Amino acid sequence: MSSATAMSDRKPALSFWQIWNMCFGFLGIQFGFALQNANVSRIFQTLGADIDALPILWVAAPITGLLVQPIVGYYSDRTWNRLGRRRPYFLAGAILASLALLAMPHSPWLWFAAGMLWILDASINISMEPFRAFVGDNLPRRQRTKGFALQSFFIGTGAVVASALPWLLANVVGMDNTAAPGVIPDTVKWAFYLGGVAFLGAVTWTVVRSREYAPEQLEAWEAASTARAAVPATPPRPPARFRNGGLAWCVAGGALLAWIMLAGLDKQLFILAAGAIAFGLLQLYCSSKAARGQTSGGLYQVTADLFAMPRVMRQLAVVQFFSWFGLFAMWIYCTSAVTGHHYGATDPASAAYNEGANWVGVLFAAYNGFAALAAIVIPWTARRMGCRRAHLLNLLLGGAGLVAFIFVRDPAWLIVPMIGVGFAWASILSLPYALLSGVLPATKMGVYMGLFNFFIVIPQIVAASLLGLLLRVLFEGQPIYGLVLGGVLMAIAGVATLRVDASAEPSEQPQ
């Protein structure tokens, strides 16, 4: 596509194979995420991490997303070169992520592995963030549910293979699944090697086989569109409001910091205090810039857009918070929960532990496989029930699946709860974006999609700070209850979906 496309006042619909090509890169991106989610806790424990320390080690991932995604979204909105608008970021992130996947299983020390997680997650986010805006750029509103659902299909398909790779390499190829204490098994190493190749290959396919509309063409369609709900102009946030908000956040963060230190509370809580102070300082910076009329900088613009986000985006933020808190609890604790609760093993060097850890990879493959199938069904249910009610149903299924882990004793039967988790995962990756994309201006699609991901990473930061403390105080440190808590929060997210304005439901009328 190019600016030479027929000058219709409506964005043209794309064929199935055009949508397929533009979404195919998510197959590779999910190789990176699935290998990370299924194996990082295993790598950390192999290198000597205690269960209590897992959440704080995982905090690298959400903090990276918090920093990277809005920045990439902001600059991708302003990029246009021979590769296009979003595709330069797809390719740069894929190259960096592939190199990180090759390096991570060779981590000699725990701190090195934690650092590699930062690099890997930052690189994945550089590739992933513009893909959401890519759908909004290229598809008319009536095709966006299909586009996001096809992304979910590729996410599920890629994760099936990636999550099961250590198990397949051990049981089909016959590769060694155990190693000396402190050494990553060969099954995990080769899974990461193959993942790096798949990541770069799939993203390169999308870069080569898809095109983008020029910014002026998108702006013309935006101006001519009658189906998109108008986004009222928001007056600039006054410097005084930035200043007052910044002072309030700094005071609250300082008070929390003092309480943590005086009461000798968990060190993980320092993350929440530091986050509150950092957000306060950011607002004070914006107050100073606004008072001097210097409002053209990227940092100021991103912060101003955060406070000016549409009402539907605020409502969906609540849904995202509880959904991703539940998912993060599953990613952190699933390995230790299954190996401990179902296999009775806590020693990462033992055969039973590694057998259980490999089975977790299969379970992760299973829920992603079910998600790939669910992605085919979700557009149909969304058309008949509406996106909001369909999302409620899927999140309730996911919550029930996570809670069921504590009741199922035979690990083989854990495949069944993963059906519900798969439906929830596919829904989380598609329906909130279908609801959101129709209320965003085309000229800020990238930055708002990046800001929307705040409500993915903030719950993960909160989870990393609180989960270890909650499990130790309330559940005697038993990781299986991390999954139960995740299931309850996922159900709460489903109920919160009903609060989203009905006007956000995608229209079947042409854009």
Image (cartoon, rainbow, N blue to C red):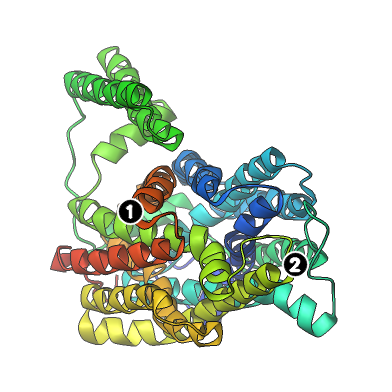
Q: Position of residue 415 (x, y in %)?
A: 51, 84
Tell me which amino acid carries mark 2.
Answer: Ala
Secondary structure of the residue carrying tag 1 is: helix
Label 2 belongs to which residue?
191
Give the distance between the C-alpha atoms of the residues marked 1 and 2, in whole angstroms. Answer: 36 Å
Residue at image position (27%, 22%) is: 255
Foreground pick, 76 / 284: 284
Say whether disc 1 or disc 2 marks the residue closer to the N-terminus.
Answer: 2
Residue placed most toward the observer, 366 or 507: 366
Which sits in the foreground, 175 or 162? 175
Residue 253 sits above or below residue 310 on the image: above
Residue 8 vs residue 364: left or right?
A: left
Indicate which disc residue 474 carries: 1
Q: Is residue 158 visible?
A: no
Question: Could you say where residue 396 lies in the image, as x and y percent from the top left?
Answer: 28, 76
Which residue lies at the image location 25% right of the left edge and 25% below the top edge?
A: 252
